[in-house]
Amino acid sequence: MTRYSVEPDAATTSKSRGSHLRVHFKHCREITHHIKGMPVAKALKFMDDVLAFKAVVPFVKYTGGIGRKAQAKQSKSPGNNGRWPVKATAVVKDMLINAIANAETKGLDAETLYISHAQCNRAPPGRRRTYRAHGRIGKYASQPAHIEMILTSKQEGVSKNDDGDGEGATGKKITKKQAAKGRFVKVGE
């Protein structure tokens, strides 16, 4: 059993994770940051669109040398920075499909699932060497990633009480001082 950075309620969630995945960490971070909080169907459609170059992954944190894209305006990316990281998108999509399958095995409804937690961490770099001028050797490292995601089933909201009873039902705002006076018990009268 592996440790996740968050331990949610097991009855309403499903999990999926991958370790030492040979895809760029920075790409994975931007993808997971963008899809976190999305409903599952919307996230799958987004990743299909990225693979078809119809939608762009907005790059928010790692923006050095990232070109501007017209499609990035749709997601209100700062500076319209974005890319289409195909390999990383395919890996994250496969993990999402795996998490959906885990949810269906648990008996959860796939329609009500949303991505409550998506995280990407750096994995130890894969080290190779490259040969430089004058007989020197330089490093040639890959930057793999650990990815984890948790899907949670949406809960139905609580309906508003309309009978007029209860605290704050009148809609009047009271100050902290007035609330404290209401809690104060008079002694000796």
Image (cartoon, grey):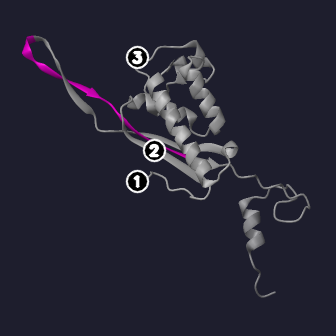
Q: Are marks 1 and 2 in contact (CB under 8 Å)?
A: yes
Query: Dot 2 surroundings within 10 Å: few (below 14), some, or many (20 or more)?
Result: many
Q: Position of residue 171 (x, y in %)?
A: 85, 55
3 relative to 174 in the view: left or right = left
Q: Amino acid at mark 2?
A: Arg
Magenta span contains residue 142? yes
Q: Are marks 3 and 1 in contact (CB under 8 Å)?
A: no
> Relative to 145, does residue 179 appear above or below in the rendering?
below
Please report the residue visible at 82 percent of the width from the left and 60 percent of the height from the top. Answer: 168
Q: Nearer the viewer, mark 3 or mark 1?
A: 1
Q: Which residue is mark 3?
A: 65
Magenta region: which residues?
A: 134-150
Magenta span contains residue 129? no
Please report the residue visible at 54 percent of the width from the left and 38 percent of the height from the top. Answer: 96
> Helix, strand or loop at disc 2?
strand
Q: Earlier in the sequence, mark 3 or mark 1?
A: 1
Q: Position of residue 20 (x, y in %)?
A: 35, 39
> Relative to 82, does residue 94 appear above or below in the rendering?
below
> Helix, strand or loop at disc 3?
loop
Q: Earlier in the sequence, mark 2 or mark 3?
A: 2
Q: Main secondary structure of the magenta part?
A: strand
189 relative to 57 in the view: left or right = right
Q: Position of residue 87 (x, y in %)?
A: 44, 25
Q: CA distance from mark 2 to mark 3?
A: 29 Å
Q: CA distance from mark 1 to mark 2?
A: 9 Å
Q: Which residue is mark 2?
A: 17
The numbered dot on residue 2 is 1
